[in-house]
Amino acid sequence: MIREQYGLDRIIKLASNENPIGSSPKGIAAAKESYHDIQLYPDGGLMLRSKLAKLYEVKLDNVVVGNGSESILANIVRTFMCDDEEVLTVAGTFIGIYVAAWSRGVKLVAMPLKDFHYDLEAMADAITPKTKIIYLSNPNNPTGTYFTKREFEKFMTRVPTRTLVILDEAYCEYAQEFDDYPDSMTYRLDNVITLRTFSKAYGLASVRIGYGFAHEDLCRNVLKVKLPFEPSSIAQAAGAGALDDTEFLTFTQKTNHDGRLAMPKLYDELGLTYVPSAANFFMLPFDTEEKALKFSDDLERRGVIVRPLRGFMLPHCVRITIGTPEQNEFLAEALRDMCMARA
Ligand SMILES: Cc1ncc(COP(=O)(O)O)c(C=O)c1O
C-alpha cells in the first residue's frame, strides 16, 4: 500500500525490532524437518522445554514455553491476578503488559521513567499490599535503556515475596556484552519469572515461540492456564534448532553491535536526539507528539517504516530498529534527504 501511495521502489521495515539478517538457518531447517508430523497435535511444549532445561541446567519443571513470550506474559497475568490486585510498571515500556493488564480488568500503575530509565527506587516505594505483579523489561522496549546488577539486586531486597517480578529479557542477547547487565539466569529468585523470545536475536518472530524460567510452582500454574497445544510443533522445532545455531546468534550480535555504534554518529551528524541503547533499536524523543508523527510520516514517504510510540505511553517518541549495514545506509539517505528538504 505504501509502495503505491508514495510510488516507492524500495521499502524497509525498522518498526518491530525483528532480526534484519533473517532467521537462524538451523531453526529453518529444523522447522522444515518437523513438517512430516503436522497431522498430529503438538506435545504442549515438552520437547522445547526439555531442550531449554538441559541447556540452562534447570529442571524441566522450571521452564515454560508459549506462542511468543507475549502469550506467556498474558497467561501469567491471567493465572495470578485477582480482581482487586495491581500491576506495577512504568509509562514507557512494552505495550503487551498494558494490554494484558487492561484486558484482565485489573489496575495498572504506571510510574514515570527517570531520564528514560526505570526508577527502581521509586518503584520499590510504590509497592503496596495490592501489588501482585511488577513488570520490568531489561533492556527496556522502547527506550533501549537497562538497569544494572546493583540496581536490580537492591530493588529485589525491597520486593515482598508475595509479589511476582516479571523480568522480560526479550533483548538480552544484545545486552549481554555489558558487564553490569543483570542476566536473570544467574539469580533464580523464587518470585522472579524470566521471559525470553526467539523473535528477536534468533529471527523467528513469525512462528511465535517464546520461553520463560521460574519456580516450579509458578510454572505449574501457568502451564495449567495456557492453551493445551500451544506452541505448535513447527515453532518448537524452529526454536530448538535455533538454540544450536551459535554461529547465527554471534553474527546477529556482531551486526547489531556495529550498527549500535554507527547509528549515534548519524543521529549526531543530523542533530537528532536519541537515547543510548543496549538493544537492537534506538528511541528518538521529540518536543511534541506532532513532531514525532511528522518525523515518522516523512520517513515512511521515503520508504522507511518506523514506530511512533503513543501505544507505549511515550507519544513524543519514535523507535527505529537497527538494520543491516545496507538498511542503515538506506535510512541515513532518507534522513539526510529529510534534513535537506527542511533546510
Ligand atoms: C519487551 C518485549 N517483550 C516481549 C515481546 C514479544 O515477543 P514475542 O514475539 O516473543 O511475543 C516483545 C516484542 O516486541 C518485546 O519487545
Image (spheres, helix red, strand yellow):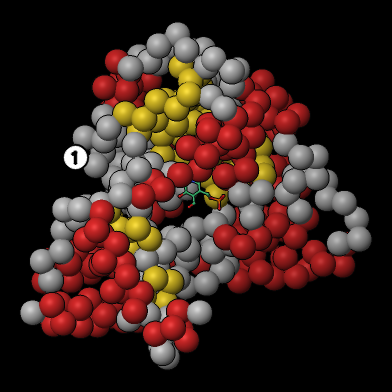
Query: For this view, does 66 lie left or right of residue 330?
Result: right
Instruction: Give the percent coordinates (x, y) of residue 53.
Output: 65, 39
Answer yes or no: is residue 85 visible.
yes
- Circle 1 crowding by C-alpha within 10 Å: few under 14, some 14–19, many from 20: few
Instruction: Give the percent coordinates (x, y) of residue 301.
Output: 34, 79
Q: Is residue 257 placed above or below 50 in the rendered structure? A: below
Instruction: Give the percent coordinates (x, y) of residue 297.
Output: 32, 70
Residue at disc 1, CB closer than 8 Å to ligand 1: no
Residue at (76, 40) in percent of width and height: 227
- In the figure, residue 115 lies in which quadrant? top left
Query: For this view, does 112 lie left or right of residue 5?
Result: left
Q: Is residue 319 placed above or below 139 in the rendered structure? A: below
Query: For this view, does 245 lie left or right of residue 292?
Result: right
Q: Which residue does the numbered mark 1 point to in the structure image?
A: 115
Instruction: Give the percent coordinates (x, y) of residue 152.
Output: 33, 28
In the displayed orientation, state which residue is furthest to the left: 343
- In the figure, residue 338 lies in which quadrant? bottom left
> In front here: 297 or 282?
297
In the displayed orientation, state which residue is furthest to the top: 129
Residue at (33, 63) in percent of width and height: 320
Residue at (69, 70) in percent of width and height: 29
Q: Is residue 313 placed above or below 320 in the rendered structure? A: above
How many callouts does the rendering have?
1
Answer yes or no: is residue 51 visible.
no
Query: Which amino acid type is marked by label 1?
Result: Asp
- In the figure, residue 329 lies in which quadrant? bottom left
Residue at (78, 68) in percent of width and height: 33
> In front here: 18 or 147?
18
Provide the secondary structure element on which disc 1 rests.
Answer: loop
